[in-house]
Image (spheres, grey):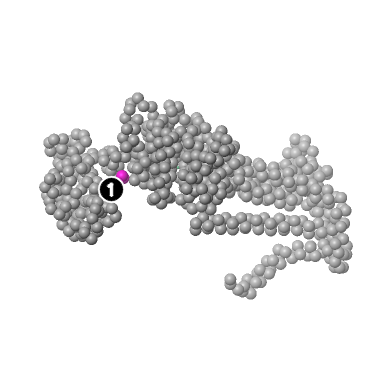
């Protein structure tokens, strides 16, 4: 994969395209962005993830020039952008509300920015056709925004922001209203555009899978702060706190006290009368420290007999089965009252599934399957 | 639909009678052959002919038209600008004062507006005539325009303008190519409102008109004091006709626009 080679954030000589330095944005008393420091590099596909109201749109609007930071500086290409008005920034934004021009046709909406550049008439026409084709809206070119559906409007907004091929493209939930198939196609289209043009993308999404698919790095935000910035796989595999682990994907969280168990391992006392969970923390953990053990359901094996080869094994009873087609999630109740989720791929037909409700089963995992979180 | 009860029918009749009976009488008597206003002596259109030959009335009509067109256009430009600043300008020093002052003429008694303008014109030595009436009418109708336009501005999504800026428009270009087309219906109805107000106005015009320029309402008012003539009836009938046609056209056009929009939106949902 190209992404594994592309890692400017790991190179200390690389200059970031965008730098947020201790940026704070307040609306009255309300702090929407709280002392945020962040680097985004050229050619990155940077995804912002976070719950509603955590400040994703505000961050974008500061880059586009519609809001000024209350404190701190934002630099683009090393230059402070605060004195540059929106229309002079080489930044285009796709608005969460689409913000299409209601009095213009789909065609003219897409051509709007191009007409304000030094492109010739023919070039504009060709470019708009190309954009219409990409978002599959050729048939709707003559319609006004109120004459097309919500998903179609979203595609017009996307095409309009892409048309000018800016240096930096801000997409605020660009694909939320599209059906799965079209969304996946457009995701690949976006990645393709990014490869071809070298544009830097900052994308807001509520869809983790989308962030995982398209992004070179993901920033998880909460209450105006960036909690963790990392590549999608590292965000998923090694979250730095309970919040991130819980926010991204499905996770089992078990609280307990960690005690050294040799070989960089710890044993986690988590329930009365149960053997300690053997885990491998990333850093040193104080003996007896209160920690949270996080493990993804797909890393928990479910079997009928005790898995002898695994250092961790607990017994429980199946409470519930969520069948998702390709995979099933088993909710297993332990005698301690914990409910652990275990996921298996459904490589057999449903009639031949090995477990059913109320079955007594064993759950097991390796010493490195989970992470030990200290906060 | 529910049937009208006798109570509803009576209220309806009474209401209409109160509103339109006086006008109806006026229209009927404008076609009276007799010179006596209250005695019917057969149908005739002679007073309309007389009217066309009456230089004083024609002059007044011409002045009224000029004043109406000029003042409503000026008021629309200024009122739209004021509305834009108030709705989009964000917080600036003296904003509350400014908005209060724009809307003050709405509640100010016309006599006071007229009088103060008169004093102003005298003190700066401006000769009263068409120009002063235009200024006066612009002053008081501008606030109506800005009320109409700002209600439209408030209801439309700011991000549309931001999108225009984002795509490379200067703020002025964004206003011209995005904001203005969207608020155009409100601007047009503001203009119509200003024009009607100017056409109707008697009080402020009396204060600010000079001997050289008389508007139609002033002319009618002063000639009525010498007794109502059938000519006045004819003139008023024409004015009623113009206003009625204007109002009906405006409401039909806006109704059709709303209906079309609703239909389009429905299509968008069903497609
Ligand atoms: N102009 C404003 N005035 C006051 N508060 C604002 C303003 N704009 C945003 N906020 C507040 O700032 C916070 C962050 O808003 P923002 O739009 O950035 O959220 P978001 O992360 O984009 O959320 P969502 O996922 O729902 O779009 C919210 O609590 C919001 O209420
Ligand atoms: Mg948002």
Q: Which quadrant of the figure contains the C terminus of chain A?
A: top left
Instruction: Write down the quadrant of residue A235 in the picture.
Output: top left
Front residue of this view, candidates B100 and B215: B215
Q: Quadrant of residue A78?
A: top left
At x 28%, y 38%, the residue is A234
Please state the horizontal and vertical placement of residue A122, each as a whole percent of the image.
Answer: 57, 38
Residue A250 included in the magenta stretch of the image:
yes
| Residue pictured at 75% horizontal, 35% vertical | B124
Q: Residue at 88% of width from left, 53% of height from top?
A: B53
Could one spot residue A21 in this view of the protein?
no
- Residue A345 can be seen, yes or no: yes
Kindly state the secondary structure of the residue where label 1 is placed: loop
Q: Report the side of B95 relative to B123 (left or right).
A: left
Main SS, magenta residues:
loop
Magenta residues, start to end:
A247-251
Using the rendered view, name the quadrant where residue A259 is placed: top left
Image x and y of residue A228, in percent: 32, 37
């Amino acid at each position: 994969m190209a992404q594994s080679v592309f890692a400017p954030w790991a190179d200390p000589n690389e200059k970031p395209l965008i730098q947020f330095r201790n940026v704070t944005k307040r609306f009255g008393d309300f702090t929407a962005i709280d002392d945020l420091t962040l680097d985004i590099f050229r050619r990155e596909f940077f995804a912002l993830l976070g719950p509603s109201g955590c400040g994703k749109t505000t961050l974008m609007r500061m880059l586009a020039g519609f809001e000024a930071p209350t404190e701190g500086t934002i630099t683009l290409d090393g230059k402070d952008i605060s004195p540059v008005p929106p229309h002079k920034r080489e930044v285009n934004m796709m608005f969460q509300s689409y913000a299409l021009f209601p009095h213009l046709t789909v065609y003219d909406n897409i051509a709007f920015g191009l007409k304000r550049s030094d492109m010739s008439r023919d070039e504009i026409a060709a470019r708009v056709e190309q954009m219409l084709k990409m978002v599959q809206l050729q048939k709707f070119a003559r319609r006004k925004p109120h004459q097309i559906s919500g998903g179609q409007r979203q595609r017009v907004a996307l095409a309009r922001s892409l048309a000018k091929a800016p240096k930096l493209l801000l997409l605020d939930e660009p694909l939320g209203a599209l059906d799965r198939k079209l969304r996946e196609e457009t995701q690949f289209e976006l990645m393709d555009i990014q490869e071809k043009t070298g544009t830097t993308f900052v994308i807001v999404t509520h869809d983790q899978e989308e962030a995982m698919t398209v992004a070179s790095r993901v920033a998880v935000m909460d209450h105006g702060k960036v909690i963790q910035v990392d590549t999608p796989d590292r965000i998923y595999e090694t979250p730095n706190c309970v919040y991130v682990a819980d926010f991204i994907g499905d996770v089992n969280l078990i609280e307990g006290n960690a005690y050294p168990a040799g070989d960089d391992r710890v044993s986690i006392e988590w329930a009365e009368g149960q053997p300690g969970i053997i885990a491998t923390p990333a850093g040193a953990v104080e003996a007896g420290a209160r920690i949270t053990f996080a493990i993804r359901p797909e890393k928990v094996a479910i079997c009928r007999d005790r898995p002898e080869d695994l250092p961790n094994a607990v017994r429980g009873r199946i409470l519930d089965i969520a069948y998702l087609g390709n995979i099933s999630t088993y909710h297993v109740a332990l005698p301690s009252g914990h409910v652990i989720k275990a996921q298996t791929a459904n490589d057999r037909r449903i009639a031949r599934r090995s477990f059913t409700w109320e079955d007594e089963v064993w759950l097991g995992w390796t010493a490195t399957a989970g992470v030990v979180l200290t906060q | 639909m529910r049937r009208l009860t006798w109570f509803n029918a009576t209220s309806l009749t009474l209401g209409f009678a109160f509103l339109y009976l006086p006008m109806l009488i006026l229209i009927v008597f404008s076609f009276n052959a007799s010179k006596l206003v209250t005695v019917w002596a057969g149908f005739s259109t002679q007073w309309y002919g007389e009217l066309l030959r009456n230089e004083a009335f024609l002059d007044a009509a011409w002045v009224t038209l000029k004043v109406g067109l000029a003042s409503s256009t000026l008021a629309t430009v200024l009122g739209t600008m004021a509305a834009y600043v108030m709705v989009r300008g964000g917080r600036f020093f003296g904003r509350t004062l400014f908005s209060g002052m724009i809307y003050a003429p709405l509640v100010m008694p016309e006599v006071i507006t007229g009088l103060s303008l008169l004093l102003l014109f005298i003190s700066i030595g401006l000769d009263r005539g068409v120009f002063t009436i235009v200024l006066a009418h612009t002053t008081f109708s501008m606030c109506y325009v800005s009320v109409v336009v700002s209600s439209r501005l408030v209801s439309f999504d700011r991000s549309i303008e931001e999108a225009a800026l984002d795509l490379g428009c200067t703020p002025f270009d964004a206003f011209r190519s995005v904001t203005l087309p969207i608020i155009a219906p409100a601007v047009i109805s503001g203009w119509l409102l200003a024009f009607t107000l100017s056409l109707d106005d008697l009080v402020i015009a009396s204060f600010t008109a000079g001997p050289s320029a008389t508007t139609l309402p002033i002319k009618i008012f002063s000639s009525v004091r010498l007794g109502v003539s059938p000519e006045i009836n004819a003139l008023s009938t024409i004015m009623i006709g113009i206003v009625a046609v204007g109002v009906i056209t405006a409401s039909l056009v806006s109704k059709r626009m709303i209906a079309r929009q609703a239909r389009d939106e429905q299509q968008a949902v069903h497609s």
